[in-house]
Image (cartoon, rainbow, N blue to C red):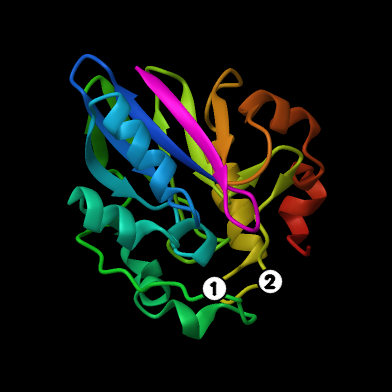
Amino acid sequence: MKIYPLEAGPVATYGYLITDSETKKAVLVDTPKDCAEPFLQLLKDENLELERILLTHSHWDHTADAAEMQRRTGAPIYLHKDDEYRATDPGKYLGWKLPFEIEAISIDEFLKEGDTIECGRWKFDVIHTPGHTEGGVCFIDHAMKIALVGDTLFKSSVGRTDLPGGDAKMLLKSIREKLLTLPDDYTVLPGHGDMTTIGAERKRNPFLKPEFFEGGDF
């Protein structure tokens, strides 16, 4: 059982290939631009079957290579229903012009709070964490004490909320009620930047101080 992180694309976004060497199954969490070829090579080298493509949310930097990965592997794409509109018409919701096109994607299955995604011996609970986007989700493996959180939570920071669909108070509510309820020793794998732990963010993250929870203005 292993996680292969890959930082790719113009804004250094992480995709995570979750693998089980015993069953030869894998799932991919987020698909940043230019991740397809290295992940496809890894799947080939390790003789792995990609079962699912899981998207934490539908901002372009997390979905840019989703269509390509689906074409090349046949793996279905999963996303929360509330984020579908951005995935199916990405050019309309970019916020600024990009020097390349983002391909629209078709969602095969919608994620929702309480779902469980299995991949060999991995077992991820889906939690809905709106705030960065309306349909943001995180994937929690309690046995392995791992949280894949997309852009909900970062080391010493939190996801931005100034783009369409963002809501600062909702984001802090999601973090407080869905992530800070996890034990301190859970490893946090974010969509950007260094990994961290729930305990470290509980103690040191300036955005998680009581005054931010009360006001939510950032």
Q: Is residue 2 magenta?
A: yes
Q: In the rendering, which numbered label is found on residue 162?
A: 2
Q: Main secondary structure of the magenta part?
A: strand
**Which contiguous range is marked in magenta?**
1-13
Whether 84 is drawn above or below 208: the answer is below
Amino acid at circle 1: Gly
Disc 1 residue crowd, few under 14, some 14–19, many 20+, Cα 10 Å: some
- Which of 108 and 179 lies nearest the eye of the viewer? 108
Task: Find the distance from the CA under tag 1 to the CA under tag 2.
Answer: 8 Å
Label 1 belongs to which residue?
Answer: 165
Residue contact between numbered discs 1 and 2, judged by CB atoms under 8 Å: no
At which x and y percent is residue 125? Answer: 33, 36
**Label 1's element?**
loop
**In this rendering, does residue 57 appear at all?**
yes
**Image point (43%, 52%), residue name:** 31
Residue 118 highlighted magenta (yes or no): no
Examine the image and state in which quarter residue 204 appears.
Answer: top right
Does residue 35 appear left or right of residue 108 in this picture?
right
Instruction: Give the image location of residue 149, x and y in percent.
Output: 52, 42
